[in-house]
Amino acid sequence: MTTKSIEVDYLFTLRAATGEPHPVGKGPKGTRVIVAVTGGSFEGPRLRGSVETPGGDWVTIAGGGVVRLDVRLLMKTDDGAEILVTYSGTGHTQPDGSLEIRTAPTFETGDERYTWLNGIQAVGIGHTVAGGVEYDVYHVL
């Protein structure tokens, strides 16, 4: 068997603040919880700015320590561009109760300075922190 790897380019680190979880209840796919994204920031070599409202995560706690994410949030660059970020992903509960998270963000913007984001696939590697989450986000080349 041949081992293959992927090439990535660092985009930014995202720190998102979250509100109190709102449990919806158990359904056929697991327990549903809605978590508002209440702010935050992002910074990298080519873009930086703030995480704006509205935004949120529609979480499914699937059991066995697995959490499925369905996130939409709004990033606003320091120079005024708005970028919609959408991602799904998986979190795995750690012994200390935190989550190790892997995501697959995509981006949408009409701002010509950042339209290069519209055609890329990214991956995010992160974890929960006090009051939110933190991810390092990479462009898959």
Image (tube, grey):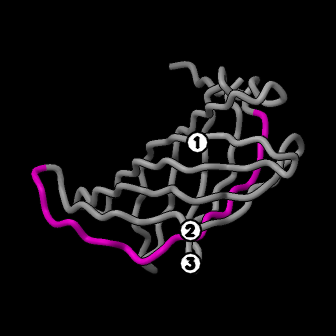
- At a point 44% along the width and 46% down the height, the residue shown is 89
Mark 1 or mark 2: which comes first in sequence? 2
Q: Position of residue 27 (x, y in %)?
A: 12, 56
The stretch drawn in magenta includes residue 21: yes
Return the residue nearer the eye: 61 or 86.
Answer: 86
- At a point 87% along the width and 46% down the height, the residue shown is 79
| Label 3 – label 1 distance at C-alpha | 20 Å
Q: Which mark is residue 131?
A: 3
User: In the visual, does 34 lie left or right of 114?
Assistant: left
Q: Which mark is residue 38?
A: 2
Residue position for label 1:
85
Quadrant holding the C terminus: top right
Majority secondary structure of magenta residues: strand
- At a point 48% along the width and 74% down the height, the residue shown is 19
Label 3 crowd bin: few (<14), some (14–19), many (20+), radius 10 Å: few
| Label 3 – label 2 distance at C-alpha | 10 Å
Give, as a single range, the part of the protein colored magenta.
9-28
Asked if marks 3 and 1 touch (Cβ < 8 Å), the reply is: no
Q: Is residue 136 above or below residue 35?
A: above
